[in-house]
């Protein structure tokens, strides 16, 4: 029986690199079509609802941008972490704490609001997310604890903290006992950029900030240190870069961006604090980061693609009756096929050819 082994290519072929993205997209669409047919839904109308219908109306395009913005913001911070081999899995908790801190600032101004409220909410959201990310940073640098486990467990603590606050001191006293805060005042809400849509200033910032992030990561000394630790930690330490300082930098940056996304969410489409402000943005942003090949520019189309699966999934549920669980499967396909294509661009299967066995002959003396 023939045997094979994986072998890293000396250089990725140009044709394979060029074909990887379109091939993975076609494979994902084909696999999604098979899934829809297996579930008893027509492939054509379901694919149309998933991937085409969101672009047919202005409202669909605006909802696409609105959904992609927090994913891209969080993924931008995760790119910095993952490029430095720091595995922040708790961005969803940092998003939640950022939203909580921003909401607490807004509620502190009372029903009338204030022109100073929104800038302070932004500062509070960034500070809250960064402070929550500082916990795994200090445990990683001082106690050599795994930032994967610490940041992940803190996500559930953040959710419980938000629930306790909206059930307790931040609950609207005139809300008939419903666990939610009052609606934020006009001064505490992000300005809407286009009438008839929900696109806010925060949406635009989320879509454009990766451009500045790409410049910083590629041109700054700190960005070079991040890339150096990702490529070779030993060489980065030999070059004089501080590993604890880099860990602190990327975790605070990632937490701050996640907290900023949380602030934009409660000051934008939600408009108040509720027990669950995140539908899992922090975990989905991990998909966006890897789908964008850990590149700040690449996460923009990746975030839009994942947002398309959210918006298209909702439209498919309404128009075709597709189960909600199928949306998650399609999102998994959108990650699986690009990663698989990238893997086979860098590696190849080589057949192991057995060497012929030469039998030794005994010559009589």
Image: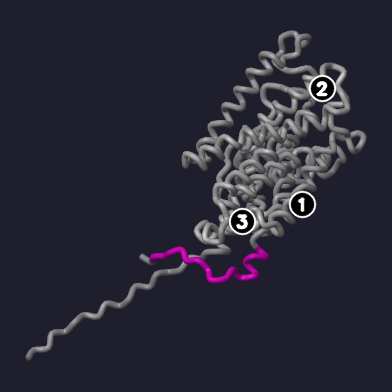
Q: Are marks 3 and 1 in contact (CB under 8 Å)?
A: no
Name the one closer to the observer, 230 or 354. 230
Q: Residue at x 66, y 34 (%)?
A: 129
Dot 2 falls on a residue whose secondary structure is loop
Looking at the rendered image, the quarter that the C terminus falls into is bottom left
Q: Residue at x 66, y 45 (%)?
A: 77
Across and down, in percent, residue 127 comes to 70, 34
Q: Earlier in the sequence, mark 3 or mark 2?
A: 2
- Which label is found at residue 225? 3
Across and down, in percent, residue 169 comes to 69, 14
Across and down, in percent, residue 45 comes to 74, 42
Count neighbours of disc 1 (C-alpha within 10 A) and say few if under 14, some if 14 to 19, many if 20 or more.
few
Which stretch appears magenta?
3-19
Name the one closer to the observer, 163 or 136. 136
Q: Is 256 on the left or on the right of 134, as rendered? A: right
- Relative height, residue 163 to residue 214 (above, below): above
Dot 1 falls on a residue whose secondary structure is helix
Q: Is residue 16 magenta?
A: yes
Q: Is residue 75 magenta?
A: no
Dot 3 falls on a residue whose secondary structure is helix
Q: Are marks 1 and 2 in contact (CB under 8 Å)?
A: no
- Which label is found at residue 184? 2
Name the one closer to the observer, 182 or 134. 134
Count neighbours of disc 2 (C-alpha within 10 A) and say few if under 14, some if 14 to 19, many if 20 or more.
many
């Amino acid at each position: 029986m023939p045997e094979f082994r994986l072998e890293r290519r000396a250089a990725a072929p140009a044709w394979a690199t060029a074909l990887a993205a379109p091939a993975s997209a076609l494979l994902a669409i084909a696999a999604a079509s098979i899934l829809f047919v297996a579930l008893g839904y027509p492939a054509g109308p379901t694919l149309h609802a998933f991937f085409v219908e969101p672009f047919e109306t202005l409202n669909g395009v605006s909802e696409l941008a609105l959904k992609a913005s927090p994913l891209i913001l969080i993924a931008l911070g995760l790119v910095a972490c993952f490029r430095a081999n720091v595995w922040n899995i708790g961005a969803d908790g940092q998003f939640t704490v950022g939203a909580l801190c921003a909401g607490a600032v807004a509620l502190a101004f009372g029903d009338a609001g204030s022109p100073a409220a929104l800038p302070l909410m932004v500062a509070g959201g960034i500070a809250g997310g960064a402070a929550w990310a500082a916990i795994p940073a200090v445990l990683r640098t001082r106690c050599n604890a795994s930032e994967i486990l610490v940041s992940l467990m803190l996500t559930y603590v953040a959710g419980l903290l938000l629930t306790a606050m909206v059930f307790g001191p931040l609950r609207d006293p005139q809300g008939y006992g419903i666990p939610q805060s009052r609606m934020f005042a006009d001064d505490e809400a992000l300005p809407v950029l286009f009438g008839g849509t929900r696109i806010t200033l925060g949406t635009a910032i989320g879509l454009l900030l990766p451009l500045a992030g790409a410049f910083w990561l590629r041109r700054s000394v700190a960005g070079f240190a991040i890339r150096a630790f990702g490529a070779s930690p030993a060489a980065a330490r030999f070059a004089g870069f501080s590993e604890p300082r880099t860990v602190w930098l990327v975790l605070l940056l990632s937490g701050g961006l996640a907290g900023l996304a949380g602030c934009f969410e409660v000051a934008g489409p939600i408009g108040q604090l509720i027990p669950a402000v995140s539908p899992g943005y922090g975990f989905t942003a991990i998909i966006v980061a890897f789908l964008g090949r850990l590149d700040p520019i690449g996460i923009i189309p990746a975030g839009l693609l994942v947002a398309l699966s959210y918006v298209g999934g909702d439209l498919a549920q309404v128009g075709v009756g597709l189960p909600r669980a199928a949306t998650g499967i399609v999102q998994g396909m959108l990650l699986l096929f690009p990663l698989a294509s990238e893997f086979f661009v860098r590696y190849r299967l080589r057949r192991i050819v057995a060497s012929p066995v030469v039998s030794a002959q005994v010559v009589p003396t």
